[in-house]
Amino acid sequence: VAATVQALTGMDYRLAAFLIPWGVILYTASGGLQATFLASYIHTVIIYAVLILMVFVVYVKVYSSDQIYTFLDLTVTYGEEECKQIFSYNNTVESTFFVPGDYACGPVAGNRDGSYLTMISGDGLMFGIINIVGNFGTVFVDQSYWQSAIAARPESAARGYVLGGICWFAIPFSLATSLGLTSTALMLPITASEAGSGLVPPAVASHLLGDAGSVLILIMLFMAIVSTGSAESIAVSSLVAYDIYREYINPEATGDKILFISRVVIVVFGLIMGALAILLQTIGLNLGWVYLFMGIVIGSAVVPLWNMMTWTKASGTGAIIAAWSGLFLAVIGWLVGAKVQSGSISVATLGTNEVMLSGNLIAILSSAFIHYVYSKFIDPHDYDFTELNKHITLVEQDTRGLTEDETDPVMLRRAERWITRRGYILTVILIFIWPILSVPAGVYTRPYFSFWVLVAIAWGFGAAIIITILPLTESAEDINMVLSGMYHALLCKEAPQAADPNLEENEAKEVSDDATPEKEAEPEKPSEDAAVEEVAA
């Protein structure tokens, strides 16, 4: 984001990297998890609004799928001399700044027929595998996902994460199909390094919409980074406050003390985020490089965490050993791979797809093997997951969000089956079936590409509608209550009190009996049937 701010506004990236976290610190430290949830919804709505606008501009207002197809098809037909003339200052070969492989011009090495219009791509396959390993890591190891799931009702969490994953996929899918392909089709002078820094969307938006496009993309990126930064700040502060401070330093800490520690950690973590961003930019590690590298660092924790959640024989000690051993082996394999492939170790040689792929695969596969062997043959367990809740201690005995229905074992098993089945189905479809079905197409024909664009547009619009409207409908009762309270407060009237839906009938009866004076018992009046029977007797 700092690189984008510098490209669009001229502000020094170091200053931008330092100032951006303060937008996160202020409302996160004051509002906590509730502020994070509310801000995340608002930010997400803005992100999808800009996404839909960009897709509409590219494929409806300015170009069409046929035009983008023609441009992409033409891009790969240029030879090196023609590319030098296109990417030049005076439209001459002598004034060129073209560097082969650094600009989108000419055939693509490793792709079917050198085309951009194909799924048969060696680099694309490697990036896909790296992407899967890294994103498995970001989900399993990211405390913010766990925290959001714990804060939600079990049934809502199960459905929400599946639906959220489907909606999220629209962001890379629809944006890449619109802004990403347009930058290549128009052969904008964007270098590979600039693309790795995330400058493709702002460059295309500026080209299509001028200053308005720059502002929209800047807002979109700021919303994304602030929303993510807020969730990460809350996650890190919770880990430090509960799992470190309360567990090892002050076991008797009160809620107020933990809240204070959390706020201090949020401020410190925000400053660390800014300093780290400056450090990475200074040593030349852009967004793309870090994205490929993250699977090497965190991929080794994926399978041990998965086993700890689903396998009764999983060893906790083995999980720790496997995670750290996998990281150690992955870094060694990554460094050795760069040395073998290029003969030297540098930022450039460590960032190639082949080297990054080797490190990512070693991380996730070695840790899986180590944890299985350790749990199966060295330290097997037989853990009873029903005992888990007994070891969770609350700071304050506040269980307002834990009703009997939400802790019902039958309901929990039902929710587990629901998420497991659909999770596996979606995984197989998105990772295997979809790419495999695209392989027979080879280089896409014009109708096939039009269908691809149609799916991307439909996915983007559908995700935007769901992500905007569904939370409002699910929270309609709470929203109405808040609006009613605000309305009565403005009119200086007392708002009607809502009944507690979790109050049991017998408790409600006791409250009613206590609030009304006792009356003398009246003789029970005989019913009509009883009177008839008495007369008959």
Image (cartoon, rainbow, N blue to C red):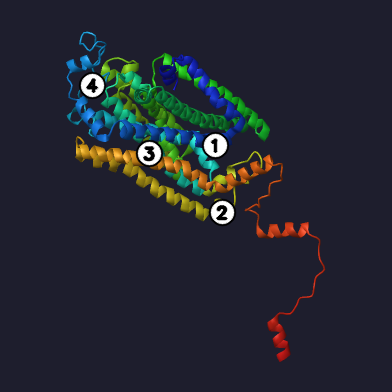
Residue bearing mark 4:
105
Closer to the chain start, of discs 4 and 3, is 4
Disc number placed over residue 38 in the picture, else none: 1
Gap in angstroms between the C-alphas marked 3 and 1: 22 Å
Snapshot quadrant of residue 352? top left
Residue flagged by tag 2: what amino acid is it? Asp
Which of the pair 487/235 is nearer the observer? Answer: 487
Closer to the chain start, of discs 3 and 1, is 1
SS assignment at label 2 = helix
Residue flagged by tag 1: what amino acid is it? Leu
Closer to the chain start, of discs 1 and 2, is 1
Q: Position of residue 283 (x, y in %)?
A: 41, 14
Q: Position of residue 92 (x, y in %)?
A: 21, 11
Q: Between tags 2 and 3, which lies in front? A: 3
Q: Give the side of residue 447 with respect to residue 27, left or right.
A: left
Residue bearing mark 2:
405
Q: Residues within 10 Å of mark 4 (few under 14, many from 20)?
A: many
Residue closest to the far bottom = 537
Residue bearing mark 3:
460
Closer to the chain start, of discs 4 and 2, is 4
Residue 331 in sight in this render: no
Label 3 with label 1: CB-CB less than 8 Å: no
Q: Residues within 10 Å of mark 3 (few under 14, many from 20)?
A: many
The answer to whether 382 is drawn above or below residue 334 in the figure is below
